[in-house]
Amino acid sequence: GAVVSQHPSWVICKSGTSVKIECRSLDFQATTMFWYRQFPKQSLMLMATSNEGSKATYEQGVEKDKFLINHASLTLSTLTVTSAHPEDSSFYICSAIGRHTGELFFGEGSRLTVL
Amino acid sequence: EDKVVQSPLSLVVHEGDTVTLNCSYEVTNFRSLLWYKQEKKAPTFLFMLTSSGIEKKSGRLSSILDKKELSSILNITATQTGDSAIYLCAAGGTSYGKLTFGQGTILTVHP
């Protein structure tokens, strides 16, 4: 079946560095992708909606200059956490809507730890 | 602001028990309610409900939506240890795929 792949699945970085997380639809085209953040023992919080070829739409309270989202192709969206701080440590999950089927698929998630 | 609330937040049962998880929602232009099971990684899809009163069933799991009460329940019968997970309820409006998630119910099934 359709798969959404995230890379890396886990990453540890130093405070102040930037980290890029990729969300890739492997066998379908995705016009829209969503980025969520999940803190330990909490639910998923939508960060932004990413549309291919246009700027992402951020949810209230999410800093767009800190969480840079790029959706350059129909199969790839990236989330870059800039100047990461320990409070950015979280589980980041993407989801994608299939262009032709309209189905929604989740990626496996990326766990970020900022030291 | 859209809101989804789940209860209970956690539940501990023994194998063979039946559990009912609750979800209530307040979503502008509501279109669908979804249930997911989350173990160590990303959520896995269980059900999508759009019509009131129609039960969806998959093995020991079933779910139903009540649009009048703005709520849904997820039932799991004859629970097994493998059912231990976080169960997430999410509601979507007109912007398909943009979901508001509840806090989740942590289910623990003891042998």
Image: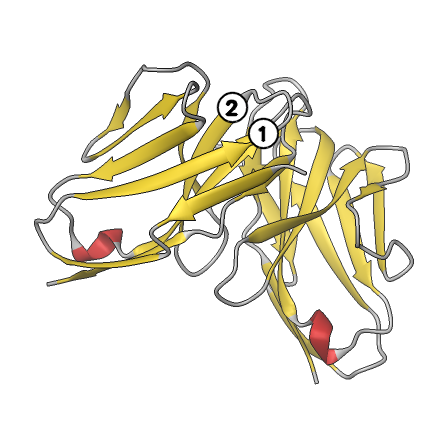
The chain under label 2 reads B
Location of residue B36 by image quarter: top left
Considering the image in quadrants, where does the C terminus of chain B appear?
A: bottom left
Report whether A60 appears left or right of B47.
right
Identified by mark 2, the residue type is Ser
SS at circle 1: strand
Query: Quick check: A89 above or below A103?
Result: below
Q: What color scheme is it?
A: secondary structure
Relative vertical location of residue A24 with respect to residue B92 in this rendering, above or below: below
What residue is shown with label 2? B32
- Residue occupied by mark 1: B92
Q: Residues within 10 Å of mark 1 (few under 14, many from 20)?
A: many
- Which residue is painted at 86% across and 67% down in the image? A82
Circles 2 and 1: CB atoms closer than 8 Å: yes
Q: What is the chain letter for disc 1?
A: B
Q: Is residue B22 left or right of residue A23?
A: left
Residue that protrudes farthest toward the left in the picture: B16
Quarter-of-image position of residue B60: top left
Relative image position of residue A26 (x, y in whole percent): 62, 39
- Mark 2 residue element: strand
Q: Residue B34, which numbered label? A: none
The reply, left or right, for residue B86 in relation to residue B78 is right
